[in-house]
Amino acid sequence: MIRYHVKSFNELTTEELYDVLKLRSEVFVVEQNCIYQDMDDKDLLCYHVLGKLPNSELLSYARIVPPKVSYTEPSIGRVLVRMSHRKGGAGYELMRFTLNETKRLYPEFSIKISAQAYLESFYQSLGFTSLNDPYLEDGIPHLAMIWQH
């Protein structure tokens, strides 16, 4: 059973921050073989969604970016599930939870994301619509997508 926690940057414990940065590096830098600046100062302004197992192991993660930081709208980014727990619905569960939290925090806004292009159908199944053709971000094809009320 995954338990979700939503915390501002200042509410994260040192251990939680370390776990988040370690898992983001495992997925986005090592697994996807993508060298990029993960720590982009946006973390300081974001809400962090931590999906933990009962033993406190970090299983999944996403960050909620406030309006006017990445886009006019709020955004969801750095979405990931530990490799050992993929294909069991953990990604859908994380995104449904994170969407609900984003709508609760910013009810008057649509939600805009920059999604890896190969995940387009995943995000469409959650109600997102593609806004453009794929573009390269850090060497990986991405799509701008929007979720509207």
Image (tube, rainbow, N blue to C red):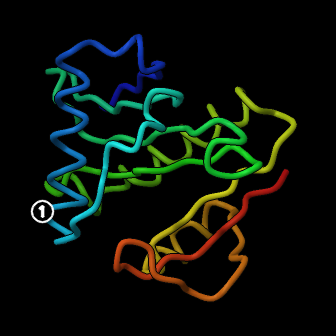
Q: Residue at x 54, y 39 (%)?
A: 98
Q: Which residue does the image show at 24% across and 47% down from the upper left?
A: 24
Q: Is 65 placed above or below 15 here?
A: below
Q: Residue 70, image x and y in percent?
A: 61, 50
Left or right of 54: which side holds 146? right
Instruction: Give the answer, above or below, for where 54 lies relative to 85.
Output: above
Q: Amino acid at mark 1?
A: Val
- Residue 36, given in percent of the width and then of the height, sits at 28, 61
User: In the rendered image, which residue does mark 1 sit on?
Assistant: 30
Q: Nearer the viewer, residue 146 or 42?
A: 42
Residue drawn at (37%, 79%), measured in percent from left and top? 140
SS for callout 1: helix
- x, y (%) of residue 146? 72, 63
- Relative side of 49 to 1, left or right: right
Q: Residue at x 81, y 33 (%)?
A: 107
Task: Where is residue 11? Give x, y as percent.
Answer: 40, 11
Is 7 located above or below residue 72 in the figure? above
Q: Please say if 11 is above or below 16.
A: above
Which of the 4 image quarters holds residue 35? bottom left
Side (left or right) of 26 relative to 81: left
Q: Residue furthest bottom?
A: 133
